Amino acid sequence: AAIPSIMQMELTKLMDCKREGPNKTCKLVVGASEDGTADVIVPVETVSGRHAELEEDGDTGRLYVTDLGSTNGTWLNGKVIKGRTEINPGDELSFGGEPLFVCYRDAHAHAQ
């Protein structure tokens, strides 16, 4: 029950983080590693050290996830993702079998 609140907090961090570079993209690494290589720590055995990357496009407000070669996979709505995949409000994102509901501002509302 604690993990969704951690993720919601970190997704807010993603939305509000400092954007650098011309494309205003913001990225966070999700993983179990506590050595500084993961920005969002999910302390679960089935989550790899550097499990996946969350990315927000600052121009469009869209949110994406990319699996970083994790052992147990990154799942979106019950399906293993391949490559960079868009996340929509209300989607269920799962890192190594740990389900997390993604709730964030609508892209159109974010862009205004």
Image: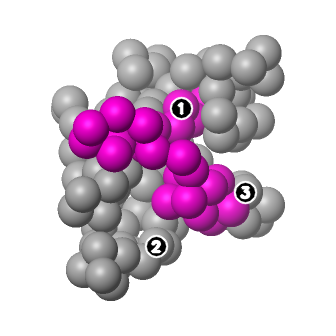
Q: Is 6 rendered above or below residue 105?
A: above
Query: Could you say where residue 60 lies in the image, as x and y percent from the top left?
Result: 22, 62
Query: Could you say where residue 106 lies in the image, as x and y percent from the top left?
Result: 33, 79
Q: In the rendered structure, which segment of residues is drawn in magenta?
A: 8-31
Asked which secondary structure carries label 1, the reply is: strand
Residue, x 51% and y 26% (percent of image)? 51
Quadrant of the rendered image containing residue 12: bottom right
Pointer 3: what residue? 6
Pointer 2: what residue? 104
Asked which secondary structure carries label 2, the reply is: loop
Give yes or no for contact between labels 2 and 3 (Cβ–Cβ under 8 Å).
Answer: no
Quadrant of the rendered image containing residue 7: bottom right
- Residue 29: image tag: 1
| 11 and 92: which is toward the camera | 11
Q: Is residue 30 left or right of residue 3?
A: left
Marks 2 and 1, the one that precedes in the sequence = 1
Marks 1 and 3, the one that precedes in the sequence = 3
